[in-house]
Image: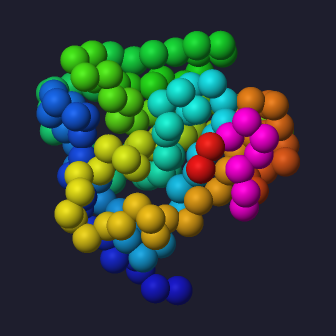
Amino acid sequence: MSTPTLKTFAGGCHCGAVRYAVDLDPSNLEASKCNCSICLKTNRISLSVDPDNFRLVSPASRDEVPNYQFASKSQHYLFCDKCGIHCFVNGSYEWEGKVVKNFSINAVTLDADQGLDLRELKLRYWDGKGENWGAGAVEKPPAGGCL
């Protein structure tokens, strides 16, 4: 098994108040889209990353990045309170009796012209609107989803 080749990518919100760097293996990126209300309204493309490979550049602390929570309040949707762009999400949830921790960036917040073409991402789709998590990710968007 080969060791992944990580490359550092920069990203952030539209106005630049929230900036980050993340180490990714550009040859092995799988992202997901969900049709739940928050993902649909923000047109989020979730790219799961190892939190150890993520560095917040500005502001100085995650505590300074506003976060939005709803429903179970188990997920923290961190966003810029100046331009409104959702940059990343972290939290945990219980699945089949086990606590699962997650951390993902919104792939569309990665800066352009870094050698990563978002059109090349392998997208998988979740039916969050129907709370059909048990079906797992699928190849085509479920009803009510978007491309």
Viewed as shown, does residue 57 lie left or right of 87? left
Colour pattern = rainbow
- Seen in the picture, residue 28 relative to 133 is either above or below; the reply is below
Residue at the (41%, 43%) spot, across then down: 105
Residue at the (20%, 63%) spot, across then down: 113
| Front position in the image: 7 or 119 | 119
- Seen in the picture, residue 62 relative to 47 is either above or below; the reply is above
- Tally of numbered discs: 0
Query: Is 143 one of the magenta-colored residues?
Result: yes
Residue 28: % across, % down? 48, 72
Q: Is residue 82 visible?
A: yes
Residue at the (33%, 29%) spot, across then down: 85
Residue 58: % across, % down? 15, 32
Q: Which residues are magenta?
A: 139-145
Image-quadrant location for residue 94: top right
Viewed as shown, does residue 108 lie left or right of 16? right
Query: Is 20 one of the magenta-colored residues?
Result: no
| Front position in the image: 41 or 57 | 41
Residue at the (25%, 70%) spot, across then down: 115
Q: Is residue 98 visible?
A: no
Viewed as shown, does residue 94 lie left or right of 96? left
The extreme bottom residue here reads: 1
Residue 125: % across, % down? 68, 50
Residue 37: % across, % down? 63, 24
Magenta part, dominant SS: loop
- Seen in the picture, residue 55 relative to 85 is either above or below; the reply is below
| Front position in the image: 110 or 40 | 40
Image-quadrant location for residue 27: bottom left
Viewed as shown, does residue 77 lie left or right of 126? left
